[in-house]
Amino acid sequence: MNVISPDMLSKTPFELIGKDWMLLTAGNEDKYNTMTASWGGLGVLWNKNVVFAFVRPQRFTYDFMKENEYFSCSFFKEDHRAALSYCGKYSGRDVDKAKECNLSANFSEDAPFFDEADTVIICKKLYVQQMSEEFIIENSIKANYSGDDYHYVFVGEIVKVLKK
């Protein structure tokens, strides 16, 4: 994979995250976990290029995100859609998702990512905050949080973008 500048991404965040989805991955070479994410964001905050990722506290990936300084967002071509679906349905507590999906883990800046990805964004965690009820102003959205298990917002500075 080649290192590129974040402004060289050929797809919009709406395509990358909302349409293509991503694997959000954190941990280390001894133990890591990944989960499928279909919402989040890319932008600029504090004069830094950043990723906004959202993880519910009951997700197995949550502890890896909280405990590690770096995380990755891996984006795949359409031929990996089944792997993305699998990683969104099953918990890393119960199965080895990478093994089940034939994904090869690699590491950069202490962040795990997958060799099969077309594009990888490596992030250094800058900020973490749990969303609150006040954050969600639409009643239709509040219905998704009957257990008050609001997502945590992870803001990560983009430290490297890798592209095939």
Image (tube, rainbow, N blue to C red):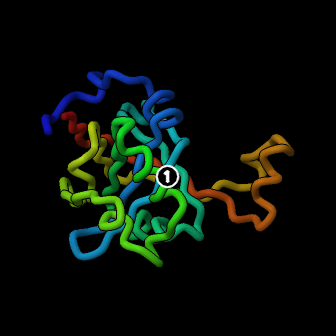
Residue located farthest toward the left when viewing the structure as drawn? 2
Residue occupying the point 33% across, 69% down: 32
Quadrant that contains the N terminus: top left
Q: Quadrant of residue 164?
A: top left
Task: Reply above or below: 145 against 15.
Answer: below
Return the x and y of residue 117 as percentages of the image width and height: 28, 44
What secondary structure is marked by label 1? helix
Name the amino acid type tagged 1: Ser
Q: Quadrant of residue 119?
A: top left
Return the x and y of residue 147 as percentages of the image width and height: 77, 67
- According to the picture, the residue beneath numbered tag 1 turns out to be 85
Residue in the foreground of this view, choosing between 48 and 80:
80
Binning the other alpha carbons within 10 Å of mark 1 as few (below 14), some (14 to 19) or many (20 upward) gives some
Return the x and y of residue 162 as percentages of the image width and height: 21, 38
Return the x and y of residue 150 as percentages of the image width and height: 68, 59
Q: How many discs mark residues in the rendered view? A: 1
**47 on left or right of 129:** left
Residue occupying the point 46% across, 53% down: 127
Task: Reply above or below: 81 against 88.
Answer: above
Residue occupying the point 26% across, 22% down: 8
Residue in the foreground of this view, choosing between 130 and 100:
100
Task: Reply above or below: 67 against 1.
Answer: below
Residue occupying the point 29% across, 74% down: 31
